[in-house]
Image: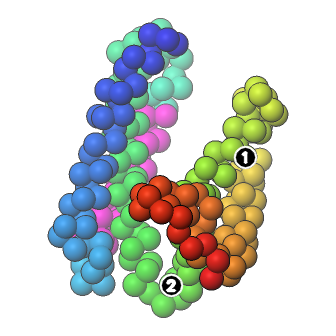
Amino acid sequence: MGFMLMFTPIMSLVVLMPIFILGFWLVVTEKITKHQEHHKFFSLLAKVGLAVGIPLNVASVLIIQHPAAGISGILQGVGQMLFYIAQYLLSAGYLGLVVCALNKQKWQQFFAAFSPMGQMALTNYLMHSVILTSIFYGYAGGQYGEISRAPQMLIVIAIIVAQIIFSKWWLNRYRFGPMEWLWRSLTYKQRQPMKL
């Protein structure tokens, strides 16, 4: 385990850098900021990302879970590599799908419910992390490996619904989420006004 930790910075760079570069490119080219004008691009992104990403993801999981992968490092490596490629493709497909949905009136109302949660993204991310580590890690619930996939999904949905309600309640009273306020205050080196 300690041996693998020394590769974490390299893997983070290899895994995260392409995502940051893609995000930067989407902003600089104004594809994401003016997404209504780039509907064809996002439609193609959704179609290709999902059409290639889903089968590739299924294939990678079948390879990784095949008994032969347990004794063959090469097979395990191929499965892992396909899995990472599929994750990028699926992410691109989901992005295209969400942006295409944003261009439709009925979906705009649905996504608007998530707006308060997005305004408090750092607070909600940290809250999500604290809740889930409390459930799964040994210092609290210790349920790692004990809860199957379906109940895991129900836990995530319950947390997201609770965070949407909490975020809306909070932002009706305050300008920023607690962590966003702290981050902003530290950035400007001055205590920022909190109450509306």
The amino acid sitting under disc 1 is Ile
Disc nearer the start of the sequence (1/2): 2
Asked if the residues shown at circle 1 and circle 2 are in contact, with their CB atoms under 8 angstroms apart, the answer is no
> Which stretch appears magenta?
41-61
**Residue at 67 percent of width and 70 percent of height:** 167
> Depth check: 133 or 62 in front?
133
Q: Does the magenta portion include 60? A: yes
- Determine whether the residue tagged by mark 2 lies in a helix, strand or loop: helix
> Depth check: 130 or 99 in front?
130
Q: Is residue 61 left or right of residue 83?
A: right
Task: Decide if residue 75 is in sight here.
Answer: no
Residue 173, numbered circle:
none
Residue 108, numbered circle:
2
Question: Looking at the image, is 12 positioned above or below residue 48?
Answer: above
Q: Does the magenta portion include 143? A: no
**Residue at 53 percent of width and 26 percent of height:** 65
Question: Looking at the image, is 67 positioned above or below residue 23?
Answer: above
Question: Looking at the image, is 12 positioned above or below residue 178?
Answer: above
Location of residue 179 in the rendering, given as x and y in whole percent from the top left corner: 58, 57
Name the residue carrying label 1: 131
Q: Is residue 148 left or right of residue 80?
A: right
